[in-house]
Image: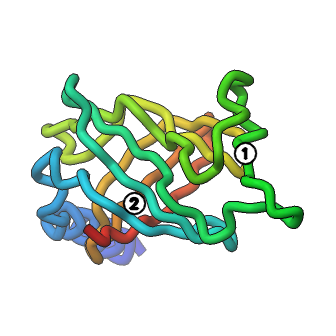
Amino acid sequence: MKGIRLLMLLAVMLLGGQSALAQNALNNNGDNIVGEYEGMQNDDRFKAKIVKLTDGTYRAQITWLERDRDAKGNKILDTKNPDKSLRSTPADRIVIFSGLKYDARKHEWNGTKIYDPQRGVRAKLVAEFADDGRLALTGSVLVISETVYWKKIK
C-alpha cells in the first residue's frame, strides 16, 4: 500500500513539474500580451484590444460586440457597472481591465482587477498564455475563480 502511495505521489510530482517545463514561451515577455483578441462569454461574442500604457501597465477595452443593441435598436450600455459614472458607457467601449502589470518572476500578468460587465463584478486578475496560445484570464473573488480564454487575432 505504501508503495502505491509513493508511486502516486511521484507521478503527481512529475506531472506537476512537466507543466512548468511546458510553459508557453509567450509568457516570457510582458509586451506579448499587446494586441487584438476575440472571445466569447456566455453567448456574447466580442473583440478586445490590449494596449501598453505610458506607465508600463496594460489596459483592455472592448472594441466590438456581436450584439451591441437591444431589442429596440438602442446601444446597450454598461448599466451594471458598480461605478455609477460609467453606466452610460456603450457596451462596445467598456474597459475590462487597466493597470495590469507583468510579473517577470512568475511569467504572468497580475496586479489589477478584471471587470465582468454581464454581472457588474470586479475580480482579482491573473493572466497568462495557455499552451494552445490563447490568453487565459482568471478572475477570483475570495475562493471562487473563473477563467475565460481570448484568442489573439492581431
Label 1 element class: loop
Q: Amino acid at mark 2?
A: Ala
Left or right: 6 with respect to 31? right
In the rendered image, which quarter contains the C terminus?
bottom left
Q: Are marks 1 and 2 in contact (CB under 8 Å)?
A: no
Q: Residue 81 occupies which quadrant of the picture? A: top right
Left or right: 150 with respect to 120? left
Residue 17 in the image: x percent, y percent? 20, 63
* Residue located at (14% from left, 38% from top): 105
**Mark identifier at residue 136:** 2
Left or right: 72 with respect to 139? right
Q: Residue 110 occupies which quadrant of the picture? A: top left
Label 2 element class: strand
**Mark identifier at residue 77:** 1
The one nearer the camera, 93 or 133, is 93
Residue 78 in the image: x percent, y percent? 70, 42
Q: Amino acid at mark 1?
A: Leu
